[in-house]
Image (cartoon, helix red, strand yellow):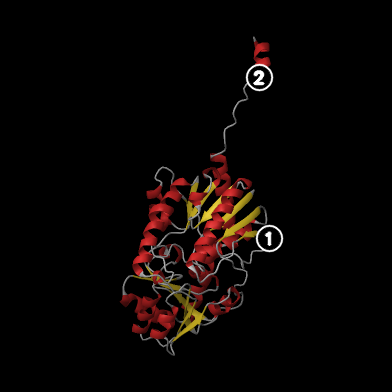
Amino acid sequence: MKIALVNSSLCNGRGSDLVVRDLAQRLSLRHDVTIFAVFGADLDAPGCHVVAPACRRSSLWSRLRALWSLSRRLRRDSDAFDIVNCHHSLLALALPKRRLLVTYHGYRGRLHFGLGRRVAGAISWFVRRWLVRPSLRRARSVSVVSHSLLQEAIAARPALPPRVIYNGVDFSARESAADRCGEYFLYVGRIDADKSVGDLLALYLSADCQVPLYIAGDGAQKKELAQKYGDERIRFLGPQPRTALPQLYRDAVAFITASSYETFCLPVIEAAAFGKPSLGPQKGALPEVIDHGQTGFLYRSDEEFRRYLKALAALPEAARLAMAAACRARAGAYSWACKAEEYEDFYADTLKAHAPLRRSRRPRPEESKRCH
């Protein structure tokens, strides 16, 4: 198959960026794959074609121009592909319906480009009302990355329920030696309001835990939160290359988050691949990727957060090793080898279900005369 994977997210660093790259690399082993992305100029995806317009990351208008340029290129070239799979579906409305599949990663309803809250809120309302929902209705088929998104997708297109395909994780650099006792708690991800990093820092400090907290990532709130909370127990590491993450996970006690709207949460599975548990709220998709008491803890109140944080910091050796084994077993279900096959089945089923019917050839006039 000739497959186009489209990532039209305007926020660089979202989980969909990694999903599209890793999925494309796995599919390229058996198919001809092209990535269309707003942020793709420095995308490392061996074996794949990459189409990305020039875009300045710091400028919203540059991103919007890149999005417009990408939509024109996609509309022009879409007939060359058997499947056009949009992730973060802003461009879905610009594409021909007959080849369009949408993978929905969820939409929080907040956009943070350094704009005022009212302007950002107006843009978010417009995107949800006029782009996200119509694109789900327009697609031939829809997949979602967790069961927590099912109802939202079904509400947009009740006649055709979506398929759930969890994201995969690249395990090529995971630790194979004995599990290590961690030195710090770790948060990995964007430092934006929708990730509730400020709430996480406030909860961590209220727990009065002596194990330090490392924050790896970048975002609109990084400078503000670093000035407010940065001390000897909280370290802001800034954006980290993917090659640096394995070492961070190996030396961590656990991955922790306070985000109430996680539609999958890749760092939970990445941490589990290194035998590290996670702590997060019992909301969104986190109950789907964290087995409470086995691969981490889910909290429902601030008091539970503090109790589970201290429990993770003081786990006995036997309990820590048992939890590490459970984490590795859990992570094994999310390998890209398995998930790429699920996407291939999804593509094949869509092509089969929507295969154009062959029209019977009309007889020529001379043939009609012969029949009579």
**Quadrant including the C terminus:** top right
Q: Which residue is depicted at the point 33% across and 83% down? A: 206
Q: Which residue is depicted at the point 35% across and 69% down? A: 117
Circle number at residue 47: 1
Q: Amino acid at mark 1?
A: Gly
Earlier along the polypeptide chain: callout 2 or callout 1?
1
Q: Nearer the viewer, mark 2 or mark 1?
A: 2
Which sits in the foreground, 104 or 115? 115
Is residue 314 among what the camera can see? Answer: no
Which sits in the foreground, 334 or 203? 203
Label 2 vs label 1: CA separation?
A: 48 Å
Which sits in the foreground, 69 or 137? 69
Q: Position of residue 45 (x, y in %)?
A: 64, 64
Q: Circle 2 sits on which residue?
A: 364
Q: Which residue is depicted at the point 41% across and 42% down? A: 159
Q: Secondary structure at mark 2?
A: loop
